Structure formats: structure tokens, C-alpha cells
Image (spheres, helix red, strand yellow):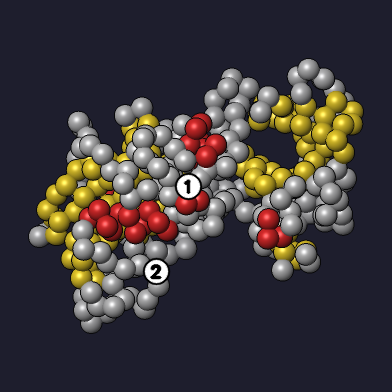
Amino acid sequence: MRITGWVAVGLALGLGGCGGTASAPGGGPSPSTVVTSAAAPYAGPLYVPTSPADPATVAKRSGAAGRALECDGRPYAGGAGDFSRDATSLPDGGLDRVSGSADAAFGHWAALQNWPVQGWPVPSSGYRVERTGLDAGVRRELRSYDVEGRTRVAVVVADGLLDYRGKSGWAVEAWAQCDPSEFPAAVTDALHLQVWTDAAGRRVPLTVVHSFPGAEHCDWQQATFLTLYDPDHPGDGQRPGRELGYYVRDVRGQFTGHTSSTYAAAVPVPATARDSGYRYQGRELWLSPTGPDTGPDTGPERRQAPAAYLVSPEVPGVGERWPALKQFVGCA
């Protein structure tokens, strides 16, 4: 597979879950996951105008759904359906279509969350109708996925929307989600998300540390990519923050010439390397001293460590070396 520069090792992983219903293929939400109403439902508006513009924040992209979230950290992703209420300005087309009921509309949206093939990493089950309401004559439902009584995924379903065919009915008007690190471990494991922890065992947002296996269609499935972001300059799942480094577990040497050093299964960790404080599956992430700008985000203040080391506490001073990537990589 030919390697090309600039594509593919980005944040948007762009899969299940809890509850007693079956997962949809690929880990997306099952249409049968809606269960009960909330004891203390969201009290804000069920409709807030959205903005699809690229610079828009998650809150602006997701409208009322974003307001219904109760994240520990920053919202991770969100958006709105491509629908209209004006028959003279119908959407151009696409996957968005209306359905005959709120359940069917949620099920259609759920079927599109076939992570990682398409959609977003959301739980496969455990959703409930949190609130129903009538706003300016429009019927709406808020469906939520909660963790410890707090909403981590919110989906607003509305009636009377027009799709590209000119048909009117129910559809997902807006949705939003918290960082996947706020989901239970069983859910992120089923989503094949690699969630790191800090030294105290707290789960770290994917917007700070993000690792994932290479794509099978590129024949990169034995490689693992690791991206670090500046926690003081955070982004979200749709607009990554300031990048600090990109690394690859290149066991087959597929990225030779694209890295600043080489992969090694067990080598002495440089005496000047520092413990990042991040942990995954019992191993510590150490970073060698920073060197010249070698990555794609080559701002004047960016200095990427030339290698990362995964160190087992049982064998201190020895680690698996993951070289830094000089640029984003993709396959064609």
C-alpha cells in the first residue's frame, strides 16, 4: 500500500455498551435502546438554532442537544440534521431522511453510527426518552444516554421536518456527545477506543491523548498511532487542539523514512526522558527530550519529542520505543 503524506492520523477517530439490548452492527446504537423517562429532565429549550460552519464550536453545531449535555469536561462532538421547514428550500440530498415516528427517526440515526466505518463513537444501548415537548407547535423529544445520572449523549428528535425528497416527518434535529472517556470502560472497550489514564487512574480525554490501531484496508492493522495534545489548548473531536506529538508503534517497519527514529521492542529509556504521567494497560508513557520541529504542526513553539517509550513498572528503565512521525500519513 502506497504511503502518502497529509491525511489520516487525526483526532476524529472519527464501538458496545450497557443495558440489556443488543448492539447494532459495528457498535452503533440499537433502535431498541430507548427505555424510561428521566426523573429530573433537562429544563432548557428543545430548539436552539445551529451553525454548520467549520469554525463553529460543538455547542453551536448541536443547538439544544449540546445544552442538554452534562459533561465532566468539554463537549466532544455534535451536529444537526440536514432538513428544512420550508418547501421552497429543500436540502440537496444525502443520507438524512424523515421517518414516520420518533422511534423510527432515532433508529435511522442510530444505524448511521456504525463506528468506526461511519458516524461517531457513541454507546450502543441505554438511551431513554428524557423529555417530550411542544415548541412553536413542533413536537420534539430529547433522548439521552446517562452515566451516573448525567447526560453524556443527547439526541433531539423533531416532527414536521422536510427531507431532500420533500417528505415531512420525524428526524434527528440535533445531537451531541461528551468525550468518550466519560463513558464506562465496557462501552469504550466495545467501541475499540484506547482510553488512557493519568498517574492517579483517572481517565484522560481523547482530546488530550489518543491512540488507535491502523486501518486494515491500508494493511496497517499491526501498527498503533498515538497523538498527544496540549491540555492547556484543548480542542474537541471535530476541531483538534494544539498537537504536541505523533508517534507510531511500527513493528513491521512500514513507516521507515517517515519517522524521526526507529521502532524497538525493548531498549534503554534515555536518562533524560520524562514520565508523561499517562498510562495505558499498566504501562507508562515516557517521552524523550524534545528536538527540532519534525511534525506537521510546525509552529515556532512546537517541539516534538523524537520518540515515545512504553515502560512497564516491572522493568524500569527499559521501554518499547515508538518513533515520532515527521508528518501525517495516509494510504492510497
Which residue is label 1 attached to? 27
Along the viewing direction, whichever of 193 and 287 lies nearer the viewer: 193
**Snapshot quadrant of residue 72:** top left
127 over 116 or under it: above or below:
above
Q: Quadrant of the C terminus?
A: bottom right
Residue at x 27% of width, y 66% of height? 98
Along the viewing direction, whichever of 273 and 149 lies nearer the viewer: 149
How crowded pointer 2 is (Cα within 10 Å; few <14, some 14-19, many 20+) is rated as few
Residue 118 image point, x, y percent: 50, 58
313 over 49 or under it: above or below:
above
**Snapshot quadrant of residue 289:** top right
Callouts 2 and 1 close, C-beta under 8 Å: no
Name the amino acid, label 1: Gly
Which residue is label 2 attached to? 95
Name the amino acid, label 2: Leu
Disc on res. 106 = none
